[in-house]
Image: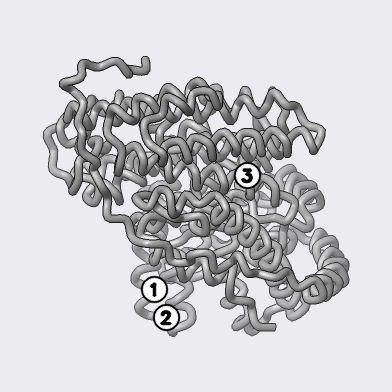
């Protein structure tokens, strides 16, 4: 869409559409964090000792393919599978090759078949959903004999979330298992009921991995047949990695404090900790520290820029800021009309320099940094389009809104930073930015989820129409009907994300998981409201991940 910045003066508004954003929940509380070297080294030693023992358990489980997949699933849910990724991928490929004969020669129950299906798909293996046909009767319905199978229905429910488009049997399985589990939760004891309810709200495939680990460690600790060595390994590793995350939060909070944008731009959301929560979800493992730090910095700046466009500045001021970002040169700062815009612009240019320096320091291609700049320029172009729509009180056709909104939502910008830091190879960056199915679906999912939970708050002030208003106008339906239809589109977007992760994949699974995990974070943050803006809603989860240790 062409950038429109030269409108007649009578179309410009001279008021500031202020939003009433809640204050930060954290302030600069992480700045004073002092990294406990001795405690960290103690964790490190114990983790390394137990890691060798757990590796032995993993290798021993290979004697039985089902036991092997059960153990891999356990490692994943406890949050420690990243220690054994090479071994797990080899073992999963072996089980996948053996799957036809494994299923043919054994009458496995619902739990086992669903678990095999989910774990293999989770690692990109193409497993046919026809494996569930054996659980249907002659009328094509799921057998009544499995409706009371709690373990089987839990596994079926989890498996159904890895569906791709056209898999009707998994759509039916999702509805079947959900109905059964809702009923079974009322008939179960408190512990099992809590587990069922959590699975219904936050299925494994659609939750932040560290949250899943924290939840499942608590659940596994109460299991009668738990493996004490594995449980201790998971707890120690969680606390060990938490210390690293706290150190990163301290670094980011200090940077944010020194930037002083909280003071200079008081109208904007102060969300450095919440943004770190989101980015941490994209890859929590220790080796991705730099990618997390640089992505969080950009996300925090994007938040402030977004608020500048739709919650503070006049349209005329925004035209100047848009032109400056597209020039991306310090000389353009003299054209900016306000001190707050100059401070923000200076921070953005400084950020680009930081990325360039870090990428060069690590011996990677300097030209890759241009991809980050271009994504930001593209996003700024969409911001001014939305500002113009707001200025003209124009409700665009849905397709036009979505085309613009998939860029303005910022999914690509933070994802691109991750790619630049972790690979900086032009091939992967070209793939990511050339409308790959998974990135397009991720952008659409984030855009629509955001609109569904934020549109009522945003429409209380002068604001660009959301997908809800566009849908209502175009199809002449109520708000509730529009929301339901867009929720269906979100479900289809997840299926596109799943499909692009099936082998053979265009790029490595680690990079694909940046996109998948970004969608998972979206699902958690926009579960029932805009928890990013209403930051008190995320406070408990942030505390679990970055403040509260797991008791040993």
Q: Is residue 418 visible?
A: yes
Residue that numbered label 1 is attached to: 184
Pointers 2 and 1 in contact (C-beta within 8 Å): yes
Residue that numbered label 3 is attached to: 294
Direction from residue 288 to residue 398 in the image, left or right? left
Which residue: 39% across, 73% down? 184
The one of 56 and 462 positioned closer to us in this rendering? 462
**Nearer-N-terminus badge (3/2):** 2
Q: Say which element carries label 1.
A: helix
Q: Say which element carries label 3.
A: helix
Q: Position of residue 78 (x, y in %)?
A: 65, 67
Which residue: 30% across, 37% down? 313
| Residue 192 against residue 244 in the figure, above or below | below
Direction from residue 30 to residue 154 in the image, left or right? left
Instruction: Tell me which corner region of the image, top left, top right, bottom left or bottom right, holds residue 338.
Output: top left
- Crowding around mark 1 (Cα neighbors within 10 Å: few <14, some 14 to 19, many 20+) is many
| Residue 80 against residue 343 in the figure, above or below | below
The one of 128 and 200 positioned closer to us in this rendering? 200
Instruction: Tell me which corner region of the image, top left, top right, bottom left or bottom right, holds residue 73.
Output: bottom right
Pointers 1 and 3 in contact (C-beta within 8 Å): no
Separation of marks 1 and 3 at Cα, in angstroms: 45 Å
Question: Marks 3 and 2: which is nearer the front?
Answer: 3
Residue that numbered label 2 is attached to: 188
């Amino acid at each position: 869409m062409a950038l429109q910045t030269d409108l007649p003066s009578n179309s410009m508004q001279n008021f500031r559409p202020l939003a009433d954003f809640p204050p930060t929940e954290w302030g600069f509380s992480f700045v004073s964090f002092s990294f406990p070297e001795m405690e960290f080294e103690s964790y490190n030693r114990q983790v390394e000792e137990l890691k060798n023992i757990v590796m032995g358990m993993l290798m021993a489980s290979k004697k039985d393919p089902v036991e092997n997949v059960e153990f891999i699933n356990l490692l994943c849910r406890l949050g420690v599978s990243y220690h054994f990724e090479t071994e797990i991928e080899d073992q999963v490929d072996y089980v996948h090759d053996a799957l036809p004969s494994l299923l043919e020669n054994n009458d496995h129950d619902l739990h086992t078949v669903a678990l095999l299906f989910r774990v293999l798909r989770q690692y990109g293996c193409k497993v046919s959903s026809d494996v569930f046909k054996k659980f249907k009767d002659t009328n094509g319905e799921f057998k009544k004999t499995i409706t009371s199978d709690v373990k089987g229905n839990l596994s079926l429910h989890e498996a159904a979330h890895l569906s791709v488009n056209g898999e009707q049997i998994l759509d039916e399985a999702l509805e079947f298992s959900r109905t059964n589990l809702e009923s079974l939760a009322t008939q179960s004891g408190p512990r099992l009921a809590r587990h069922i309810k959590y699975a219904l709200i936050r299925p494994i495939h659609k939750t932040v991995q560290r949250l899943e680990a924290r939840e499942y460690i608590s659940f596994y600790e109460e299991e009668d047949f738990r493996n004490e060595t594995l449980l201790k390994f998971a707890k120690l590793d969680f606390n060990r990695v938490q210390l690293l995350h706290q150190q990163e939060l301290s670094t980011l909070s200090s940077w944010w404090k020194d930037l002083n944008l909280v003071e200079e731009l008081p109208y904007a959301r102060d969300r450095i900790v919440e943004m770190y929560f989101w980015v941490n979800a994209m890859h929590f493992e220790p080796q991705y520290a730099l990618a997390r730090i640089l992505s969080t910095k950009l996300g925090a700046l994007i938040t402030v820029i977004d608020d500048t466009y739709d919650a503070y500045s006049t349209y005329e001021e925004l035209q100047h800021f848009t032109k400056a970002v597209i020039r991306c040169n310090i000389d353009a700062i003299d054209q900016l009309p306000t001190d707050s815009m100059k401070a923000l612009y200076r921070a953005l240019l400084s950020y680009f320099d930081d990325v360039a320096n870090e990428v060069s320091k690590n011996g990677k291609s300097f030209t890759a940094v241009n991809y980050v700049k271009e994504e930001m320029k593209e996003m700024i172009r969409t911001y001014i389009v939305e500002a113009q729509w707001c200025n003209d009180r124009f409700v665009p056709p849905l397709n036009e809104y979505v085309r613009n909104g998939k860029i303005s939502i910022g999914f690509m910008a933070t994802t691109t930073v991750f790619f630049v830091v972790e690979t900086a190879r032009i091939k992967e960056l070209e793939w990511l930015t050339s409308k790959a199915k998974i990135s397009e679906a991720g952008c659409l999912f984030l855009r629509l989820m955001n609109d569904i939970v934020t549109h009522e708050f945003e429409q209380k002030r002068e604001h660009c129409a959301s997908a809800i208003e566009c849908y209502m106008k175009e199809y002449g339906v109520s708000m509730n009907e529009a929301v339901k239809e867009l929720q269906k589109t979100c479900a289809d977007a997840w299926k596109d994300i799943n499909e692009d992760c099936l082998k053979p994949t265009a790029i490595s699974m680690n990079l694909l998981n940046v996109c998948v995990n970004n969608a998972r974070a979206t699902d958690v943050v926009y579960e029932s409201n805009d928890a990013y803006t209403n930051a008190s809603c995320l406070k408990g989860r942030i505390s679990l991940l970055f403040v509260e240790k797991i008791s040993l």
